Amino acid sequence: MQSPSKTLVFCALLLSLLATSLHAASTPSGEVEDETGFSYIVGSERGPENWGYLEEEWRACSEGRMQSPIDLAREYVEVIPHLWDLRRNYKPSYAYVMNRGHDLRLRWDDGRAGSIEVDGREYFLQQCHWHHPSEHAIDGKRYQLELHMVHSTLDAEVAGNTVVVGLLYEIGEPNAFISEVLRRITCETHGEEMEAGEEIEVGVIDPREIIRGEHSYYRYMGSLTTPPCTEGVKWIVNKQPSSVIEEQIWSLRRLVHDGAWNNARPIQPLNGRDIQLYKPDSERSNESMTSLRIDAAAS
């Protein structure tokens, strides 16, 4: 029969292993479920510059050469008029909101919220979440908010199995999609704050309400913007920002209450990567007509 002391040691080790596995738990895209192991406070022990040294699995955060986010600066952008159109096939599905520690994640049931087709491959929408301020910049300008729609092939063993669509926001009119998400959260929590790790069901949410119509977008190869900073992620960032009001931004951040007002990773080096800009036919036609009118006026 084991002594009580040995039993206590065994239990302690078991709990430690369980805690480690929960901390390392990740989604099909590779993102960690629990974000409390790192911080966005620059200069702190667990700040962005130290992410790669906190866990062996996070080494890419410091050593990777294709890290995100980046500055989508025009001097490095190549306009590709025949870049493939994005084929979005989203649909309403039951969704769940979780306080991951530094952001609010809106998760849909696996594969049931539809998909996006990129380069002939189908990627299923898994979740979305927000960063304040925006993580990506355009010509050095960072916006007030950025939404990430994370898609996966549902096969973690396939290289390049993740596509993230980024949507930038600038201050303007209230955002209808964010308003609806915040309303659902308030109804379920009765106005109380969500605890870190807490997940609640918020009913059917339609991802088609996030982005409507055709827009110019940037494409490049990068990484997850949170540990483990896995590379090989296909990034699609809308050039035309959506609108949001400051109160909606504050509400998203207050619900997390992580002690930091910002949750955006610093801009990462481009390291010679290609950035492509796709413009839909309608936008290119409008630009051509504008150019013709200017030429006619000048003559």
Image (tube, grey):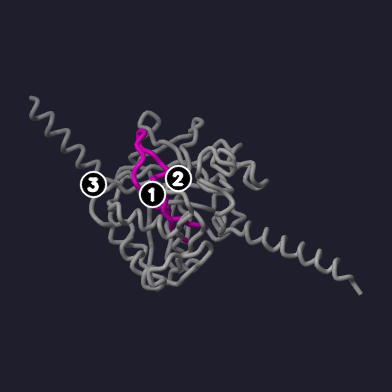
Q: Is residue 29 above or below residue 229?
A: below
Secondary structure of the residue carrying tag 1 is strand
Taking depth in this image into account, of 119 and 21 the one nearest to the observer is 21
The magenta span reads: 127-152
Residue 293 located within the stretch drawn in magenta: no
Q: Is residue 292 above or below residue 110?
A: above
Query: Left of 160 or right of it: where is 128?
Result: left
Residue shown at 37% from the left, 28% from the top: 75
Residue under label 2, please give it.
264
Residue shown at 37% from the left, 63% from the top: 207
- Looking at the image, tell me whether mark 3 or mark 1 is earlier in sequence order: 1
Query: Left of 181 or right of it: where is 299?
Result: left
- Identify the image quadrant of the C terminus: top left
Residue under label 1, please give it.
146
Disc 3 versus disc 1: distance between alpha carbons? 25 Å
Residue under label 3, please give it.
282
Q: Mark 1: which amino acid?
A: Glu
Disc 2 versus disc 3: distance between alpha carbons? 33 Å
Query: Left of 190 or right of it: where is 269?
Result: right
Q: Are marks 2 and 1 in contact (CB under 8 Å)?
A: yes
Quarter of the image for residue 36 reads bottom right
- Looking at the image, tell me whether mark 2 or mark 3 is earlier in sequence order: 2
Secondary structure of the residue carrying tag 3 is helix
Q: Position of residue 253 (x, y in %)?
A: 40, 55
